[in-house]
Amino acid sequence: MPCTGRETSGASLAGFAPVKAVVGPRERHPMEQLAAVLAWPSVVLIIALVAIFLFRSEVGALIGRTKKVGKGGIETFEGQPSQPTEEKKGVDEFFRSFDSPLLLEAEKLILDDLKARHIDLAGDREKTLLRALAANNILLHFERAYGSLWASQLACLRYLNSKDQGVDVAEIVPFYEAAKAAYPAWYANYSPDQWLGFLRSFNFVGDRGSVAFITVAGREFLKYLVASGKSGPFHG
């Protein structure tokens, strides 16, 4: 009876009954018979063909990378490592997220600029583009803040810039009170905490207990206003 599944009976493992002693030529063990059959070149060829069929993709890749065959064996070219599927998927999704003719023009300008600066190595390009992207993110952050900033908040930030150790929050409340008196409608539903919270939300002001202080981002924002020649805001 053929062996099926994971049967482990003695009969299944042995394959046949014990051999009785007989007179005459010794009957060969089935494994010896199999070895004799496999010794024929035709069988070796069949096994090789089956192996090539089962591993055809691997064999094809090896043939494509083979430089030469000599006494030392097969010498291959170094293959480019394939990109992980997940990483490739992430790149595709990123480029599908936004695209336009204007973006393509901007990309070409960047590539032309890199060539003009002789930034050709991949590693150098990555570092250069990373620095440019970080600077652009900061610029957008500052512009977004400037578009919503009120004059009293800018005055508060400039005051904190002159205080290296920061000041008690109560010391900057007068900036809020003066603006509220000048623009009561604007401040009707705008508390001192919300007013200072705007500067916190842009990471321009930090807190240590009851002490408020200007951050690195806050100082850089003030420098950006001067460097870009921005005036105002004049209200609020």
Image (spheres, rainbow, N blue to C red):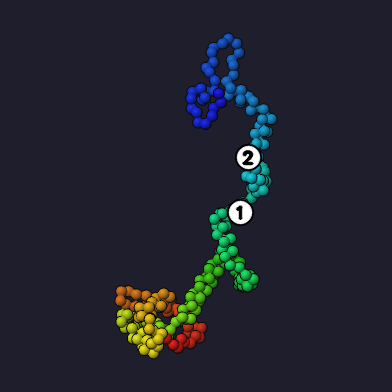
Left or right: 103 with respect to 212? Answer: right
Mark 1 or 2, closer to the camera = 2
- Against 98, residue 43 (above or below) is above
Left or right: 90 with respect to 195? Answer: right
| Quadrant placement of the N terminus | top right
- Against 83, residue 129 (above or below) is below
Element under disc 2: helix
| Quadrant placement of the C terminus | bottom left
Q: Residue at x 61, y 54 (%)?
A: 80
Element under disc 1: loop
The amino acid marked with disc number 2 is Leu
Mark number for residue 80? 1
Q: Residue at x 67, y 43 (%)?
A: 69
Q: Residue at x 31, y 83 (%)?
A: 171
Residue at which label 2 appears: 54
Q: Could you tell me if the residues under marks 1 and 2 are in contact, i.e. CB atoms within 8 Å?
A: no
